[in-house]
Amino acid sequence: MELITCEQLKARLAEKENLNLLDVREPAEHEAYNVGGISIPLGNIMSMQIDEIENLKDQEVICYCRSGNRSMQASLMLETMGFQNVKNLAGGMVAWAAMQGDTL
């Protein structure tokens, strides 16, 4: 698992790269504030309910959560499930919001 910084992600989003973003927070957290991507809570990943991203095993997947802890767990789990290129957003949505001048 590698880390990706908020600045790196922002630059890639600005370039309109086609990114596979995975929000592992709870649905209400995702609805309140996110950077896009799909929402699969950490509990679903832990119970291997990941059918909707199974086709991404050979692609880059960028995980994020509130602070980076849940997404780190999700990243490690995805790697054990055979995902080859998983990144964790350092600092999560807290760091992203701070960079944007937003508050959570």
Image (tube, helix red, strand yellow):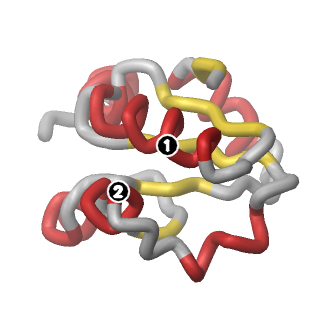
Q: Mark 2 belongs to which amino acid?
A: Met
Q: Residue furthest right?
A: 58
Q: Position of residue 102 (x, y in %)?
A: 23, 35
- SS for tag 2? helix
- Relative horizontal placement of residue 50, taking residue 34 as reference (left or right): right
**The quarter of the displayed image where residue 64 is located:** top left
Q: Position of residue 57 (x, y in %)?
A: 77, 58
> In this rendering, does residue 33 appear at all?
no
Indicate which disc residue 77 carries.
1
Q: Is residue 59 above or below residue 10?
A: below
Q: Is residue 76 above or below residue 58?
A: above
Q: Position of residue 12 (x, y in %)?
A: 74, 37
Specify few, some or many for label 2: CA neighbours under 10 Å numbering under 14, 14-19, or 20 or more: few
Q: Is the Cβ of the residue at disc 1 closer than 8 Å to that at disc 2?
A: yes
In which quadrant will I find the N terminus? top right
Specify few, some or many for label 1: CA neighbours under 10 Å numbering under 14, 14-19, or 20 or more: some
- Relative horizontal placement of residue 55, taking residue 91 as reference (left or right): right
Q: Nearer the viewer, residue 29 or 56?
A: 56
Q: State which tag comes first along the sequence, 1 or 2.
A: 2
Q: Nearer the viewer, residue 95 or 85?
A: 85
**The quarter of the displayed image where residue 3 is located:** top right
Kindly identify which residue carries mark 2. 46
Q: Is residue 100 above or below residue 48?
A: above
> In this rendering, does residue 11 appear at all?
yes
Indicate which disc residue 30 carries.
none
- Relative horizontal placement of residue 23, taking residue 16 as reference (left or right): left
Q: Mark 1 belongs to which amino acid?
A: Met
Residue for point 52% across, 38% down: 75
